[in-house]
């Protein structure tokens, strides 16, 4: 099964609103990453948070990580129509699993102008 | 700088035919990954290489799939014979991995495969 599971599966909001997506995972991780995919395109890395970090910011993005609950959230503030895309969390395991980056099923975000 | 380059972008073939997908990673990256994306199964890791050596191929569906990385600049994913259920978008991604760098992935634009 997928290591990361996003919630909700789909999110529809108006421009200017905030969008929050959640990710849960099952096993211990080295880091957790968020990626964005526009329709018909490859994935693009957005932000990475290490297992010893609790919160990270990058522009309009805010990521939190709660290792005790094995969950993360991605907040996009003041959303724009151009933020419409699928968003995936991906976990990188520790130890012998370090090399593998396992993706969740993704959240489809639609931002209406 | 050029990103990860994949070819072909689109491939339509008939069941039973051989399919070869190609990938040129970003220069200087030492890890390469092949993923498959479908609506039903999402993004699945098929295989990944580190310094041209296959590290984990547990995601390769069956013996019909094979992947090679003869040098740091090139990798192929081959399906022989192809079946309709192989229809998917295949992504190649590369990264730089060392003890300090946590290795975010850089993806190509994908190869969309349709097997009739």
Image (cartoon, rainbow, N blue to C red):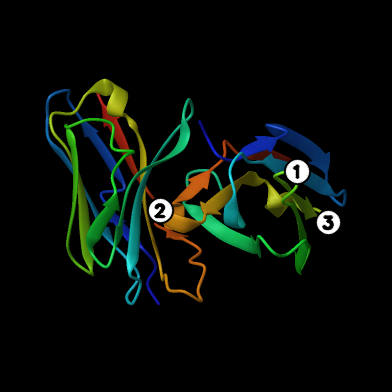
Splitting the image into 4 quarters, where does residue A53 fall? Answer: bottom right
Q: Position of residue B44 (x, y in %)?
A: 42, 39
Which chain letter matches label 2? B
Which chain letter matches label 3? A
Question: Hey, which residue is sitting farthest right in the picture?
Answer: A17
Name the residue located 54 percent from the left edge and 58 percent from the top edge. Answer: A44
Mark drawn on residue B109: 2
Same chain for the residues under marks 2 and 1 in the image? no
Q: Work out whether B25 lies above or below B84.
A: below
Name the residue located 60 percent from the left edge and 46 percent from the top edge. Answer: A88
Question: Hey, which residue is sitting farthest front in the picture?
Answer: A95
Q: Work out whether A103 lies above or below B29.
A: above
Mark 3 nearby-residue class (10 Å; few <14, some 14–19, many ≥20): some
**In this rendering, would B48 be left or right of A61?**
left
**In this rendering, would A78 be left or right of B85?**
right
Quarter holding the C terminus of chain B? top left
Q: Position of residue B23 (x, y in %)?
A: 27, 57
Q: Position of residue A23 (x, y in %)?
A: 68, 42
Count the marks: 3
The answer to whether residue A113 is visible is no
Separation of disc 3 and disc 1 at Cα?
24 Å
Name the residue located 31 percent from the left edge and 40 percent from the top edge. Answer: B58
Closer to viewer: mark 3 or mark 1: 1
Mark drawn on residue A20: none
Quarter holding the N terminus of chain B? bottom left
Which type of secondary structure does the marked residue at label 2 adopt?
Answer: loop
Work out whether residue B87 or residue A8 is closer to the camera in this orientation and state it.
Answer: A8
Mark drawn on residue A69: 1
For mark 3, what is the residue? A77
Mark 1 nearby-residue class (10 Å; few <14, some 14–19, many ≥20): few
């Amino acid at each position: 099964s997928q290591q990361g599971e996003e919630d909700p599966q789909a999110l529809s909001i108006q421009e200017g609103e905030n969008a929050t997506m959640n990710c849960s995972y099952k096993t211990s991780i080295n880091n957790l990453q968020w990626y964005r995919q526009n329709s018909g395109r490859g994935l693009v890395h957005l932000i990475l948070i290490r297992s010893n970090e609790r919160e990270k910011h990058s522009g309009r993005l805010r990521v939190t990580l709660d290792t005790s609950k094995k969950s993360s959230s991605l907040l996009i503030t003041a959303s724009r129509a151009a933020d419409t895309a699928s968003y995936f969390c991906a976990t990188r395991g520790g130890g012998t699993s370090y090399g593998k980056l396992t993706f969740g099923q993704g959240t489809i975000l639609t931002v209406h102008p | 700088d050029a990103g990860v380059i994949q070819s072909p972008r689109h491939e339509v073939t008939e069941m039973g035919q051989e399919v070869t997908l190609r990938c040129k990673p970003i220069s200087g990256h030492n890890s390469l990954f092949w993923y498959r994306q479908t609506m039903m199964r999402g993004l699945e890791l098929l295989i990944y290489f580190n310094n041209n050596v296959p590290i984990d191929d547990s995601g390769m569906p069956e013996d019909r799939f094979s992947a090679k990385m003869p040098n740091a600049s090139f990798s192929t994913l081959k399906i022989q014979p192809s079946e309709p259920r192989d229809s998917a978008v295949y992504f190649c991604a590369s990264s730089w991995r060392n003890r300090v760098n946590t290795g975010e992935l850089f993806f190509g634009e994908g190869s969309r495969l349709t097997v009739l």
